[in-house]
Image: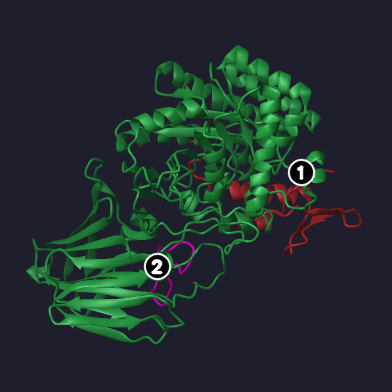
Chain colours: A red, B green
Amino acid sequence: MVEFRCPLCLSRECETFVKYDPKHKDYYCSTCEYTGTEEDVKKMYAVITSRFKLLNKRIKRF
Amino acid sequence: MLFNLIHRPIPTDKKCVEAFKFQQDVAHRNGFRTTILLPVPALFDKATIEQVKAYSQDFGDELGVYFYNLNCREFKEKFNTLEFQYWLFSPEDKKKIADWAYELFAENFGYIPSAVGSYYFDVDSLAYIKKKYPVVECALATCFEEGANVFRGTNGYWHLFSEGGPWWPWIPSKNHIHAPARNSAQSLDVVALPHLVRDMLHSILHRDDCYASHPANLLRGKIYKDKGLAYDLNFIDQYIHQEKFNDGYSYYNMFVGPNWVASRHYYEEDVKISRDLYVKTLDYLGKKKKEGSVKDMTMTEFGRWFKANRKLDEPDQCYWKDILYGSRRSIYWIRTSGYRATIDPMAGSALTDLRPYAGQVKMPVGAGANELWNGSYPFVLNQYRKGGINYFGRTGVFSASILFKDKKYDLSFERTEIESLDPKKRSFSSPFSIETPEGPLKFEKTIRCSESGITVDIKLIKSPAGQPIEVTQYLTGVQGISGSGDYPEDIRGITLEAVNSKGKNRLPINYTSKMITIKKPLKLMADLPKLDLKLSLVPVNMCDSGKIADACLSGPMYQMALIKKIKPKEKMSVCLKIEKR
């Protein structure tokens, strides 16, 4: 099992590690309402990263 | 750009032992000498001691003491405490810990080191160390702008409140670690370094640990995609670019604990990615060193360079552009020995954060101290932490509004840009163009920063049919230390004063909304006894009227405002003076 930070908390720059629920085979956050699969966690991480529009753009002039 | 590369060993964790060696190897491969700060547990580990002695002999790395990772068996046996953050201990315990660490270092190495570090040093602790161990020359002293945002972001884990300090090296005064010494009598005689350098825009808008000269923390902030590290390299380049605004001087440091490249640590990616970023970052800095634009030094070497080359009253300036979100946003910072100011073009080039070092307020921190945990330097303006722009229209800024006909335009809501930045004069201008029903209003705001004040000119360039405008330059004052609550702090105790040729009008702050208006003001002044400070608005050219206003609980900030009607080609000029009482 991989440790993840809650993507919902992380989207507001807050770090809480989600816990795995073997019964439902998904992750849940003890701080907020987030519940989701590993795939869903990664999708939400991608949304966080998508805010950074210049992430891979080299800037030549400041 | 001058560069300090700092490492620390963690001998209590096998993975970290290997990771520390990895970091050192990458540094040396790039021709960098490092400063190795030894935490207390490392001073009990013979293998680490022999290892760092060899680094010192073979590569010229500097060795120093680091007041962190105190949670080792020996420390717990000696101090019998759950506390582990050095700056939060009582003054007496901080002295004992310092003496203990220095004795251990001297036993192992045969000398007292001149470099020392902590995530935060309260001024009394560093003063004690300097007095008892005068060879100390350079201290990794504070974390720039870490505070409320990081505390909330870590769910209350990271008890480090260090807002309001300089972003670049400085010599602290004997009163507050963040307040630069104004003269040699005030000087602590130790060159203080910030722990990391930060993204100077996101550091004030976000938790700034994720936007810093720390590649692994970029992973923590998800500022990483597809092996790319353009942001990291742009970040370094923009720091080199700061030489343009500081007479050829710029400073950069990196201090990544081995735990960040030993195993996953607050990031989800494989540790190989963190190592890859570390290697690529140092390779890039190494390339810049070969090209001649980066010069590495040990901490003590830098401390000596700083004392020899930077005067106590020499200001640092920073003009920083967004290199991540694509917002076209930028921000200007200046740090003199009298204040630190932030000017934000997104808010109409208002002064949005002000830390008045002139007051030299003394605020000890740690068990037994009044402030207990809060090591920040107080603010007197703060848009970002206390009172953002809201529908009530009050926020902690020094800004302006324009009245044309019956409509008022608050410049805090107008986005502008920084133009014609003159680093020598510490001045720049910001253009405005506002659409009115009768046509555009064009005017320009010019800001000039001196050692003890900031002068703002507003010049009308063009108006519909040459009609005049009424300009109000206002200061909406707050007072506090970031992070001590969501509601702005109690400002009772402040007294406002409005002065003209007929006399003085005083207004104590008591949340009554009372207002006093005078004609042809000579000065408006706020007396802040808690911060030992006077803030004054002084008309450089005569104003028509001035007003002072008490706070109310729906808008818990006081106001001072100067008002003047101007025609095209005319200007209104006001100086904000920041003085000790």
Looking at the rendering, which quadrant does residue B355 occupy?
Answer: bottom left
Q: Is residue B456 left or right of residue B510?
A: left
Q: Tell me the chain of label 2.
A: B
Looking at the rendering, which quadrant does residue B280 occupy?
Answer: top right
Residue B509, horizontal then vertical, whole percent: 39, 80
Q: Residue furthest front?
A: B132
Q: Quadrant of the C terminus of chain B?
A: bottom left
Mark 1 Cα shell of 10 Å, populated few (<14), some (14-19), many (≥20) = some
Residue at horizontal 31 percent and vertical 34 percent from the top: B244
Q: Quadrant of the N terminus of chain B?
A: top left
Looking at the rendered structure, which numbered label has been put on residue B71? 1
* Label 2: which secondary element: loop
Which stretch is magenta?
B381-395
Residue B388 covered by magenta stretch: yes
Residue B75, horizontal then vertical, whole percent: 77, 42
Residue B25, horizontal then vertical, whole percent: 64, 18
The image shows residue B344, relative to residue B102, as above or below, that is below
What is the C-alpha distance between the residues marked 1 and 2? 41 Å
- First in sequence: mark 1 or mark 2? 1
Looking at the rendered structure, which numbered label has been put on residue A12? none
Both marks 1 and 2 on one chain = yes
Residue at horizontal 44 percent and vertical 75 percent from the top: B491
The amino acid on which the numbered mark 1 sits, given as a three-letter code, is Asn
* Label 1: which secondary element: loop
The residue singled out by tag 2 in the image is: B396
- Along the line of sight, which residue is nearer the eye, B302 or A25? B302
Residue A33: tell me if it is visible: yes
The amino acid on which the numbered mark 2 sits, given as a three-letter code, is Gly
Residue A21 covered by magenta stretch: no
State yes or no: discs 1 and 2 in contact (Cβ < 8 Å). no
Q: Is residue B174 left or right of residue A49?
A: left
